Image: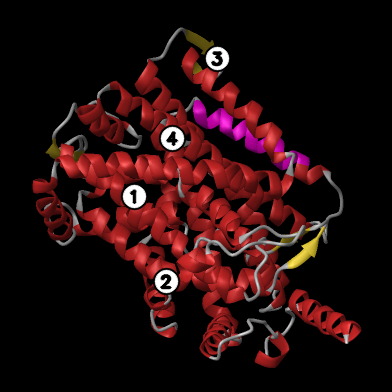
């Protein structure tokens, strides 16, 4: 099975997908005239726009929900894996993916807002919705919905749980070994698993509001705490920082570290971490209450910066400054290009990060990574559940009933358990397949949407014009020639009716 998963992963993550991700980001960056730079100030301002709706969530809450998906194991264990397999140069390609991916995140999240619907007292949206309403290709919408349910409900939760289990083991040891159907498992892993399952069950039965309320507190707190520790490490080693940045940039283009490996691992882990183009961000973006779709598109573009430029870079600097890493060569098997720590240290885990913080802060640093991983992974699992739930809601128009959603909840809880007790390499490969499947469908889909209707670009220009003219900010899809944006059409009609009744 492990060999089969690895072969499928190699097919999904061929060079074609890597260059498709980079190409799509460059494509939308040029078309938006690098909105991710021009509107940086506006992104920060929009974060704190209030929400007065009982149906939607605020822009900050939407950012927190999407960041709960973006800021996860990929930022701690994923960065360590990128360095371990692709060398320090992989971090440079993660930055490239983040910079270009911010424009992709803008496009997909704006589309999520344009074509969202109101169902069961909450907003729903995502790639399935905009493929259906914009491209009018129901088969593609159904294909993405099924892929997202499989990826977020089956493939991806195990990666998060696996990293939590490994972090607990790194900090507390195995404890008493318990014999299970999956082999011997340490009691501390089982304790961590029990905590995750109990809290997970409580929250996922509460809907997007409960998820948003939880993530808006946990995600900023843990991300800020993590970045502060990283800044302390950097401050204590300021003299090494120029050399580290030089190493990252030069290693990105050297044959010794594997030019292809650096790009491949940098792009793969970059997309896994910040999820730009993967099609996950639009689900949370669609749930936000905003005056104009472009506003949430810009907020989600900013979330890519938070994830990769801030959190991933923090991890990379800690690992590289303290030199707590190895770089594995492809051939012959087991050979190291760089070896600074014990050869038995697991590359596809948070071990490098924990060792880096331990070298500076002792046991506190190692324990903090374990705690951060727990919360980062847990909130990411919540985000995966919400994405799966949204796509089940989309399919419910064809397959009625509440049973599919109950099944998804049970499957996610099972996969969390499965991921906790299995090996890292195997679980990461399954997760990569999930990310790759959604990325293939979503990126090709949003490129097709551009050639059909260009709604995301029309939105951006409309928003820029209204801001330039001093407002007020409104969105009229019919005026822009955007079809099937029924939520906004109804909203505009209701606003006009309310204005008439006041007069």
Q: Name the residue that disc number 2 marks.
A: 41
| Rendered residue at 46%/26% (across/down) | 165
Magenta segment, prevailing SS (helix, strand or loop): helix
Q: Point out the frontmost of discs 3 and 1.
A: 1
Q: Point out the frontmost of discs 2 and 1.
A: 2
Report x, y in % for residue 421.
50, 25
Q: Which mark is residue 373?
A: 4
Q: Nearer the viewer, residue 216 or 157?
A: 216
Q: Earlier in the sequence, mark 2 or mark 3?
A: 2
| Rendered residue at 52%/10% (across/down) | 179
**Residue 250 versus residue 500 in the image, above or below:** above
Q: Earlier in the sequence, mark 3 or mark 1?
A: 3
Q: Point out the frontmost of discs 2 and 3.
A: 2
* Contact? badges 2 and 1 (CB < 8 Å): no
Q: Nearer the viewer, residue 16 or 93?
A: 93
Q: CA distance from mark 2 to mark 3?
A: 53 Å
Q: Name the residue that disc number 3 marks.
A: 180
Q: CA distance from mark 4 to mark 2?
A: 30 Å
Q: CA distance from mark 3 to mark 4?
A: 25 Å
Label 2 element class: helix
Q: Name the residue that disc number 1 marks.
A: 312
| Rendered residue at 34%/45% (across/down) | 227
Determine crowd level at label 2: few under 14, some 14-19, many 20+ residues with C-alpha closer than 10 A. few
- 48 displayed left or right of 8: right
Q: Point out the frontmost of discs 4 and 2.
A: 2
Q: CA distance from mark 2 to mark 1?
A: 22 Å
Whether 138 is among the magenta residues is no
Report x, y in % for residue 20.
41, 70
**Residue 109 versus residue 492 in the image, above or below:** above
Q: Earlier in the sequence, mark 4 or mark 1?
A: 1
């Amino acid at each position: 099975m492990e060999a089969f998963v690895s072969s499928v992963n190699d097919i999904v993550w061929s060079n074609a997908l890597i260059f498709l991700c980079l190409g799509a980001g460059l494509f939308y960056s040029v078309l938006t005239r690098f909105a991710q730079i021009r509107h940086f100030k506006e992104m920060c301002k929009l974060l704190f726009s209030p929400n007065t709706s009982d149906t939607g969530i605020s822009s900050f809450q939407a950012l927190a929900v999407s960041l709960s998906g973006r800021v996860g194991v990929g930022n701690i264990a994923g960065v360590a894996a990128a360095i371990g397999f692709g060398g320090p140069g992989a971090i440079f390609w993660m930055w490239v993916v983040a910079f270009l991916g911010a424009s992709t995140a803008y496009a997909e999240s704006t589309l999520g807002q344009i074509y969202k619907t109101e169902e069961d007292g909450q907003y729903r949206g995502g790639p399935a919705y905009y493929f259906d309403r914009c491209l009018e290709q129901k088969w593609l919408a159904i294909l993405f919905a099924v892929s997202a349910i499989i990826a977020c409900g089956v493939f991806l939760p195990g990666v998060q749980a696996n990293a939590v289990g490994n972090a607990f083991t790194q900090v507390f040891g195995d404890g008493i070994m318990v014999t299970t159907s999956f082999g011997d498992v340490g009691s501390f892993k089982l304790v961590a698993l029990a905590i995750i399952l109990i809290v997970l069950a409580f929250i996922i039965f509460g809907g997007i509001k409960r998820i948003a309320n939880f993530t808006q507190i946990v995600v900023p707190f843990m991300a800020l705490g993590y970045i502060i520790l990283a800044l302390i490490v950097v401050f204590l080693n300021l003299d090494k920082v120029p050399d580290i940045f030089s190493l990252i940039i030069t290693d990105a283009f050297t044959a010794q570290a594997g030019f292809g490996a650096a790009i491949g691992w940098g792009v793969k882990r970059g997309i896994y971490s910040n999820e730009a183009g993967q099609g996950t961000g639009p689900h949370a973006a669609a749930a936000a209450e905003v005056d104009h779709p472009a506003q949430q598109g810009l907020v989600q573009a900013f979330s890519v910066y938070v994830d990769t430029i801030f959190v991933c870079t923090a991890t990379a600097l800690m690992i590289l400054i303290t030199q707590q890493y190895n770089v594995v060569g492809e051939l012959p098997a087991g050979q190291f290009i760089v070896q600074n720590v014990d050869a038995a240290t697991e590359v596809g885990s948070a071990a490098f990060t924990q060792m880096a913080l331990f070298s500076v802060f002792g046991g506190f640093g190692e324990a903090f990574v374990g705690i951060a991983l727990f919360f980062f992974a847990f909130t990411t699992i919540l985000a995966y559940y919400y994405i799966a739930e949204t796509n089940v809601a989309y399919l419910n128009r064809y397959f009625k009933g509440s049973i599919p959603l109950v099944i998804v909840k049970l499957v996610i809880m099972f996969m969390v358990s499965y991921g906790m007790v299995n090996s890292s390499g195997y679980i990461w490969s399954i997760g990569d397949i999930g990310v790759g499947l959604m990325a293939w469908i979503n990126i090709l889909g949003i490129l097709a949407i551009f050639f059909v209707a260009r709604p995301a670009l029309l939105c951006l220009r409309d928003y820029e014009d209204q801001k330039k003219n001093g407002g007020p900010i409104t969105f009229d899809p019919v005026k822009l020639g955007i079809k099937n944006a029924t939520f906004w059409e109804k909203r505009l009609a209701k606003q006009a009716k309310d204005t008439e009744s006041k007069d």
